[in-house]
Image (tube, rainbow, N blue to C red):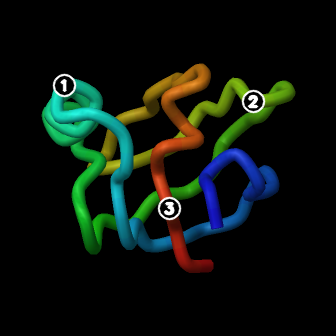
């Protein structure tokens, strides 16, 4: 499921990052890599704040490129 469908407080494991090479590289540099765990901290429409690798990161439409398992 895309990260944008997760609810506040849900935890998940990243399974796949889609999109172009630049998008995948950018998200990877932020810590969004396969098998990383994350938690949705806050959400407003498709804008998501997640806790990953000990940091909180806000994502806009890039969140739809992150596929997770809950």
Q: Quadrant of the N terminus?
A: bottom right
- Image point (45%, 32%), residue name: 56
Dot 3: element: strand
- Image point (59%, 20%), residue name: 60
From mark 3 to mark 2, how far is it between C-alphas?
A: 14 Å
Q: Is residue 45 left or right of residue 61?
A: right
Q: Earlier in the sequence, mark 1 or mark 3?
A: 1
Numbered badge on residue 22: 1
Q: Quadrant of the C terminus?
A: bottom right
Badges 2 and 1: C-beta atoms under 8 Å apart? no
Provide residue 65's location: percent of width, then percent of height.
48, 44
Check the image and report above or below for 49 versus 35.
above
Tell me the residue that label 2 is attached to: 46
Provide residue 25's location: percent of width, then percent of height.
15, 34
- Image point (25%, 66%), residue name: 34
From mark 2 to mark 1, how far is it between C-alphas?
A: 20 Å
Q: Quadrant of residue 46?
A: top right
Characterize the local packing of mark 3: few (<14), some (14-19) or many (20 or more) Cα atoms within 10 angstroms. Answer: some
Tell me the residue that label 3 is attached to: 67
Q: Nearer the viewer, mark 2 or mark 1?
A: 1
Provide residue 44's location: percent of width, then percent of height.
83, 26
Q: Nearer the viewer, mark 1 or mark 3?
A: 1
């Amino acid at each position: 499921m895309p990260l944008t469908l997760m609810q506040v407080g849900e935890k998940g494991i990243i399974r796949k990052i889609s999109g172009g090479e630049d998008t995948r590289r950018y998200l990877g540099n932020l810590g969004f890599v396969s098998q990383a765990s994350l938690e949705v901290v806050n959400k407003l429409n498709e804008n998501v704040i997640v806790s990953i690798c000990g940091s909180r990161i806000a994502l806009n439409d890039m969140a739809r490129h992150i596929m997770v398992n809950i």
